[in-house]
Amino acid sequence: MPGLGIVAFESYEDGNGEIYVMNADGTDSVRLTENDAHDWGPAWSPDGSRIVFTRGADTGPETEVYVMAADGSDPVNITNRPGEDRTPAWLPVAPDPAAAAPPR
């Protein structure tokens, strides 16, 4: 978590990718996801309250982007469409929405 010394990471400890958090010194590892799907690529929200990540289907090539609370609760599929949606990242909040728009 930004500024608090907590790291989000993926681990294959149980045979498939799951999202974990731990202290920056390597102590107190906690699993946040536990399912048959492959979860990877966690990224903290700028305020540290949420984590965005990619979840692969347990069958087939489908991948989706999920957001969950920093404690692993309330995972929500925010893409929910066919195909591969992956590698999410947070952008800092811009005071003017036009400032966050990509150049044309």
Image (cartoon, grey):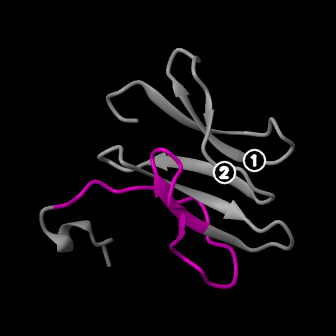
**How many numbered discs, if any?**
2
Q: Secondary structure at mark 1?
A: loop
Helix, strand or loop at mark 2: strand
Q: Label 1, on which residue?
A: 17
Compared to residue 1, the image places residue 79 above or below, namely below
What are the residue bounds of the magenta stretch?
A: 65-94
Left/right placement of residue 51 relative to residue 9 reads: left
Give the residue at the far bottom of this rendering.
Answer: 82
Q: Which x, y percent locates residue 51?
A: 47, 51
Amino acid at circle 1:
Gly
Q: Which mark is residue 40?
A: 2
Quadrant housing the N terminus: top left
Within 10 Å of disc 1 (Cα), the crowding (few <14, some 14-19, many 20+) is: many
- Tell which residue pokes out farthest to the front in this image: 73
Relative image position of residue 54 (x, y in whole percent): 62, 60
Return the x and y of residue 87 as percentages of the image width and height. 58, 59
The residue at 32%/29% (across/down) is 3
Q: Is residue 78 magenta?
A: yes
Instruction: Say which of 69 and 54 sits in front.
Output: 69
Residue at image location 19% in from the left, 61% down from the top? 94
Residue kind at label 2, given as amino acid type: Trp
Residue 35 position (above or below residue 61):
above
Instruction: Estimate the spatial distance between the alpha carbons at disc 2 and disc 1, rounded to whole Å.
Output: 6 Å
Residue 76 percent across, percent down from the top left: 52, 68
Quadrant for the C terminus, please: bottom left
The vertical placement of 26 against 92, above or below, is above
Q: Confirm or deny contact between disc 2 and disc 1 (CB under 8 A).
A: yes
Mark 2 or mark 1: name the one nearer the start of the chain.
Answer: 1
Majority secondary structure in the magenta region: loop
Front residue of 13 and 84: 13
What is the number of the mark on residue 92?
none
Q: Nearer the viewer, residue 7 or 75?
A: 75
